[in-house]
Amino acid sequence: MKQIIIATKNKGKATEFKEFFNAYDMAAVSLNEREELPDVEETGETFEQNAALKAETIANILSQPVLADDSGLIIDALDGRPGVYSARYAGEDKNDQANINKVLTELEGVPQKDRTARFICVLAVARPNTETQFYQGICNGHISIAPSGKNGFGYDPIFIPDGYQETMAELSPKVKNQISHRKNAILQLEETIRKNRSLY
Ligand SMILES: O=P(O)(O)OP(=O)(O)OP(=O)(O)OC[C@H]1O[C@@H](n2cnc3c(O)ncnc32)[C@H](O)[C@@H]1O
Ligand SMILES: [Mg+2]
């Protein structure tokens, strides 16, 4: 089976990419399975910059195409926070529970109609000596009053996607993978996957 390297150490993302690329008969291999590869420092100020940093660093080391995902949660009532800093919102140790608690505390007293939010996913595909390409996906929704559900990762227990009553963590992985920001970004990439053999 053809392989595509995904420059991520996030196990939740890696699981979702394996599912997506399975549909294209490709095996998604994350950095958790390639432990000799470095964790790339995310010094950018935008999703694009960080996705490019991750994809290009690993593509240059391996001399092969690499995909990276930089994603996050944008909350309108918090002026767009946690945004690009979603993973480390409550501290450097990237604790999902602490991040959720910080968001809920900051939103205390904010009524449902003002709790609108969206997940954003920017994918970067880097190939050696080629300009990096970007694909973006969005999932709109709002932030719940309390966490609920065990599926997914990150902020899924407090994110209710538009058109649903449940949080992303209460929905099945199958449903999440049909409606998520990551799925929508993959759909933008789909034509390239099908047509451009050099992605393999
Ligand atoms: O950089 P890599 O190694 O890919 O892993 P990361 O967890 O640091 O990933 P990001 O820098 O892109 O940070 C994105 C954060 O946004 C949140 N996030 C992204 N996608 C999500 C999703 O599908 N569901 C819930 N939270 C998500 C989650 O907290 C992630 O840690
Ligand atoms: Mg990261």
Image: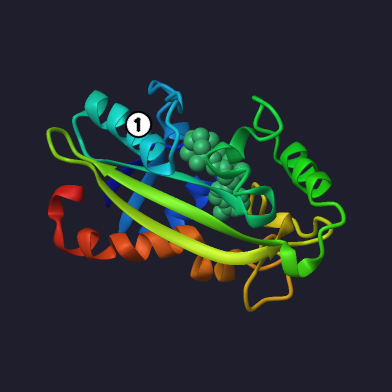
Residue name at image x 44 percent, y 63 percent: 183
> How many C-alpha atoms fall within 10 Å of the one at disc 1: few (<14), some, or many (≥20)?
many
User: Is residue 24 at all visible to an observer of this figure?
Assistant: no
Colouring used for the render: rainbow
Name the one closer to the observer, 178 or 44.
Answer: 44
| Outermost residue to the bottom | 163
User: Is residue 34 at all visible to an observer of this figure?
Assistant: yes
At label 1, the amino acid type is: Leu
Q: Please tell me whether residue 49 is drawn above or below residue 189 in the rendered image.
A: above
Residue name at image x 80 percent, y 59 percent: 148
x, y percent for residue 37: 38, 23
**In the figure, is residue 199 to the left or right of 171?**
left
Q: Which residue is mark 1?
A: 53
Mark 1 CB lies closer than 8 A to ligand 1: no
x, y percent for residue 24: 30, 63
Name the one closer to the observer, 174 or 155.
Answer: 155
Q: Quadrant of residue 143?
A: bottom right
x, y percent for residue 152: 63, 54
x, y percent for residue 111: 82, 65
**In the figure, is residue 177 to the left or right of 112?**
left
Q: Quadrant of ligand 1?
A: top right
Q: Quadrant of residue 61?
A: top left
- SS at circle 1: helix
Q: Please tell me whether residue 3 is drawn above or below residue 7 in the rendered image.
A: below
Residue name at image x 77 percent, y 40 percent: 102
**In the figure, is residue 185 to the left or right of 156?**
left
